[in-house]
Image: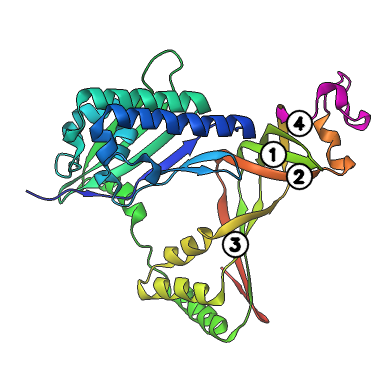
Amino acid sequence: MSIMEFRDLDFEFSHKNLSQENYLKLKDKLFSSYQALCSKHQSISDYGIIYEWVSFNDENKSIGIIIPRNWQQNELFVMFILQKKAFSVLDLPGFNHHLPSHLNDFSPEAKDDFFKFCNQLLKEIDGKFYANWQVFNEGMYWNCGIDVNHNNDGDYVKVDYRQDAYDKKDEDAMEEVEKISEEEMTEDQKSQLNELLEAVKKGTNNSIEISYDGTVAGIESVKYEKGDDYITYNRNFEYYSHTCQVDLTNEEILDIINISLENNDYSAFVEGLVDESEFLNADSYEYDNYDLEFSSIDDDEIPKELLDEDGGIDLLKLDDNGWSFEILDQEEEFDESEITEISISVGDKQFTF
């Protein structure tokens, strides 16, 4: 019998923007609810350490999920991902070979209460998540995915689970599997990377920019601030071509290049830079559908220079009146952009990939 192998979990978690007041209340409520859950069920108290993978960012007033190492062996995280599918976990590919050691120690009642707790949490923050993973053995592989959304009308979250089984001999299916495999580099790519390697060894500073073409669109949360006052709101955004910058030391660049050369894997070089990149600028950055979320200014105290025709805040006037601007969070809902160029400067040498 072959041993099934889990691959890394592809996980996306999102929730609505939270004001400082709502964030603090929610944080206290979550801890109190979870402590009550642990008090009721010794099994959750013993094995279910939720604080290891649920993180609170007090600065951004956001909740995040940290993927545990060997995620498929973390009992409580498996229940969080699968929700009520965890009742039939032995029927799911891979778990019948890699059952988390203490998963059966949770009673049906404990699992049920935990699932209700999850729905309550997601309802409070208008939260949802998506997870996708692959399970392999010698002759087959399974692609599994689950969409989980809060349920305002019931005790349990809404779940859409799916899995597809493939024979590795099926060439069409294997094209999807091979996307995670190495991309061998050409002789020209290898020569150019070796030239870059020598330049980085001798250089003292660098500049890296990655250019993209293709539409990116989504929703972002922004904040304007002036003195003790601040205003937050949501808006849709869309842009076409954009540029990201990469902030790496020469030593870090050397590591990326060496890994790529040692494994004859050009994609490792590109992905190593992309993983460390941050948005720099975009052409024709457009946004609309403004939705005011919170304002520290009472309606009767709004400065005249910020008023709109209806007596509210004209968000477009904030830029012209000394308010600082910050993007708090951004969620891409559509991305068809592709890399068109990677530009690297090391000392007086310029490299283009």
Residue 22: percent from left, percent from top: 59, 29
Q: Residue 222 carries which label?
A: 1
Measure how far apart labels 2 and 3 are at the Cα level: 30 Å
Q: Residue at x 17, y 43 (%)?
A: 101
* Residue pointed to by mark 2: 325
Q: Give the residues in magenta.
A: 293-313
Tag 1: amino acid: Val
Q: Earlier in the sequence, mark 4 or mark 3?
A: 4
Tag 4: amino acid: Ser
- 54 drawn magenta: no
Q: Is residue 73 above or below residue 191?
A: above
* Residue pointed to by mark 3: 341
Tag 2: amino acid: Phe
Circle 3: element type: strand
Circle 2: element type: strand
> Which quadrant is home to the C terminus?
bottom right
Q: In this view, does 95 lie to the left or right of 54?
A: left
Q: Which residue is drawn at 87% across and 44% down?
A: 322
